[in-house]
Amino acid sequence: MKVEIGVKALGANERQAEANRRRLREAGWVAVNLLSSPGSGKTSLIEAALPRLEAVCAVAVVEGDVETARDAERVAAAGGRAVQIETRGACHLDARMVARALDELELGRPASGWGLLLVENVGNLVCPAEYLLGEELRVVLLSTPEGDDKVAKYPEVFRTADAVVLNKMDLAPYLDFRVERVGRDLAAVRPGVPVFPLSARSGEGVEAWLEWLVRNARERLELRKSAGA
Amino acid sequence: MKVEIGVKALGANERQAEANRRRLREAGWVAVNLLSSPGSGKTSLIEAALPRLEAVCAVAVVEGDVETARDAERVAAAGGRAVQIETRGACHLDARMVARALDELELGRPASGWGLLLVENVGNLVCPAEYLLGEELRVVLLSTPEGDDKVAKYPEVFRTADAVVLNKMDLAPYLDFRVERVGRDLAAVRPGVPVFPLSARSGEGVEAWLEWLVRNARERLELRKSAGA
């Protein structure tokens, strides 16, 4: 019985996620779901990305946290348009929470033609993996201090990644982090997934990831247009 | 209805946790629940603690992970007695999983008079907080690369901590981690909780935490004895 209820809840979430995706699509927006452990640097990566992305397209941010609005404040301080979702105990975002954030953002068709909605999930490598939010792309971050064994230990979230960001590469000289071990484990759970080693703090490597992000977001929009959706 | 089912499940978990605690108590063992994000260094702390603890009391380890038995292998390589629980997708340990691990460990009364059972939970700052396992003490780890805002953002797990370990202090010189900010946030959610800055890698500070651990574990055993339990 418990399992059935779980399945029903996931079914309702997928329907809401699909509605979010359609709503965004109609306004020319692409959502990106950012997932990682607490403290891997999701907010820092968004801060580093904002000025460069805003030269290319419209950008808005949804910040998910169990408590506090600190991340939305950080993004706003960096000049970004952000709303905060406080989950009040829940260990992941769901599509209904994102729908409410969309109401608040009132995203219209951007002057630049299209927009990127960056959705920062709750810091958690397990629960958020199961919940679609309406995203076109999933980016999973892993930071070097967390250790190079995390893909093997938390494979589910990496199994759904469109790209993997290895953040805090500036700390790698002080750690025993083997990028090649992560690559080996990823090859087993998500063959061919692009991996971007970078440092959100120093900015090194961020450009390559952004290039991938913009190209893929655009492709998703074009695909949808050509599919008549 | 969903909430009620959740409450029932938690009630059943608490009863099983109490049964685990009684079972351990009767054999002279104290369980410690170790909680943190993925990669904060729970296994490394156990590795650093093992040789020093084994000079004082019997030690056994339960390793919780979503997948892989790597942590139990690491503990065994460090000379420890360990069993692995693979939760196969579940985002936290529960008391029933620990009961099965106790069956496997077959803990008898130690020659040294008492024993410490270190239980390493799944790496997750949200879900494990709600689930008692039968522990007498809860230790929450936070590592410096995760950032000094984690107590404010994930208060629930810190609200139940008997001690907080700040791990990877050896990386602090390369980060903007303010110990005093963590202290301030802890004072709001868990006033008076002892905080142990340390480095499991270099060993610095580990001794102070172990002293606290051994003293408090012993006190819990004595209290129970004097209460005739």
Image (tube, coloured by chain):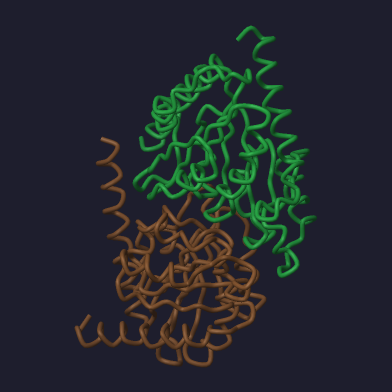
Chain colours: A brown, B green
Q: Is residue A5 above or below residue B60?
A: below
Placement of the N terminus of chain B among the 4 image quadrants: top left
| Residue B194: x %, y % from top left | 76, 40
Placement of the C terminus of chain B among the 4 image quadrants: top right
Snapshot quadrant of residue B161 = top right
Q: Is residue A199 above or below residue B113?
A: below
Residue visible at 58% across and 87% down? A51
Residue visible at 57% across and 29% down? B31
Choose between A57 and B96: the one closer to the eye.
B96
Q: Is residue B75 above or below residue A207?
A: above
| Residue B64: x %, y % from top left | 45, 42
Choose between A77 and A42: the one closer to the eye.
A42
Residue visible at 73% across and 28% down? B215
| Residue B110: x %, y % from top left | 57, 20
Choose between A46 and A188: the one closer to the eye.
A188
| Residue B208: x %, y % from top left | 77, 41
- Left or right, B73 with respect to B167, comes to left
Choose between B68 and B178: the one closer to the eye.
B68
In the picture as drawn, the residue positioned furthest to the left comes out as A227
Q: Is residue A150 above or below residue B90?
A: below
Exactly how many numbered labels are in the figure?
Answer: 0
